[in-house]
Image (tube, rainbow, N blue to C red):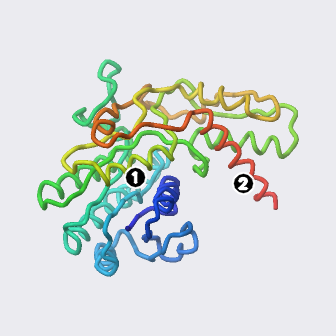
Amino acid sequence: MLITGVTGFAGRHLVAHCAELGHEIHGLVRPGREGAAPEPVVPHPVDLLDPTDVAAAVARLSPDRVFHLAGASSVGRSFGAPIETWKANLGGTLAVMEALRLEAPETPAVVVTSGEIYGRVAEADLPVGPDTPLRPLSPYGASKAAADLAASQYRAGYGLPVARVRAFNQLGPGQDPRFVLPNVARQIALGEREGQEQIEVRVGNVDTRRDFSDVRDIVRAYWLVAERGDPDVTYLACSGRSLPVRELVERLAPLARRPVTVVSDPGLRRAGEQADLYGSPDRLRTDTGWEPEIPLETTLRDTLDWWRARVLDEED
């Protein structure tokens, strides 16, 4: 099988899941990043923005299955780098779709986009579903919406067996500290390492509500969609409920080895963001049998333990 984005947060967990199932895994990575690919991936240096390069790799590898996860991942960063974000998310998806059209039109593929493509949604219209209108607020959300539409068009126009999964907020070990939970976990881990008597963590808007799931549950959903999903159906990988960021932080703080004080920093808040967003995983459950398995407490503990190990490595 072939996976793009193997060096990313979800990509690494998808690799681990597929490896447990005994599959041979090949990954497309940026030239020079071959060493960053996790075991047991066989890395292939490819410029994902070069359709010819991607098509040549697909022709050479003849994968029996493709997962497309690569792209820009930060909502906040996308506002400062909109063109880069559009190129990565839409351009990369188009390159993969073209490669499949030209070199592997019968190969099943899963294209992962994001719950952020829904953007502005009235509270009365929650949970969102496959048919909820898309009103993205950020360059990230808009570029992912365009990638979602591109995958849909390649399915409708060329008959490619491409399934789409809109993934909502994911948590777990290995996530970039630009995101709220790993950011808080890292601050706690640093405070513990430094022997602070009282650890102060700074966060943005703690009242924002999002649909959080463990990344290991989400990548299992990707696999099940590839195995059992219908390419003509749009799947939402989510829990079906939202939690305030405040609750995540409050449930993480007691796991610290020192008392924790939480400070909401206005400078870290993003103006105009959607207050609440969650989706319906009903069709995913019906078609694939997927259910989330990992309790939030396990996710929080694993994330904090990962950062404890990481900050010790940073000290060394």
Left or right of 170: which side holds 136? left
Disc assigned to residue 82: 1
Disc 1 crowd rating (10 Å Cα; few below 14, some 14-19, many 20+) is some
- Identify the residue at image location x=33%, y=63%: 66
Secondary structure beneath label 1: helix
Quick check: 222 above or below 294? Answer: below
Classify residue 60 as left or right of residue 70.
left
**x and y, in percent, of residue 268 in the image:** 59, 36
x, y percent for residue 33: 53, 72
Mark 1 → mark 2, Cα distance in angstroms: 31 Å
| Apparent side of residue 310 relative to residue 191 in the rendered image (left or right) | left
What type is the residue that disc 1 sits on? Pro
Residue at the limit of the structure toward the top, as seen here: 124
Q: Of helix, strand and loop, which one carries label 2?
A: helix
| Front residue of this view, candidates 220 and 309 | 220
Q: In which quadrant of the rendered image does the N terminus lie?
A: bottom left
Residue in view at x 41 percent, y 29 percent: 274
Where is residue 206 drawn, in percent x and y?
58, 27
Is residue 309 placed above or below 61 in the rendered structure?
A: above
Q: Nearer the viewer, mark 1 or mark 2?
A: 2
Q: Amino acid at mark 2?
A: Arg
Extreme residue in the left direction: 157
Q: Which residue is mark 2?
A: 310
Left or right of residue 190, residue 240 in this image: left
Between 138 and 60, the one lying in front of the other is 60
State the image coordinates of residue 61 (x, y, percent, origin top left). Answer: 34, 78
Image quadrant in which the C terminus is located: bottom right
Which numbered tag is attached to residue 200? none
292 and 153: which is toward the camera:
292
Q: Residue at x 58, y 46 (%)?
A: 178
**Residue appearing at x 53%, y 25% in the figure:** 244
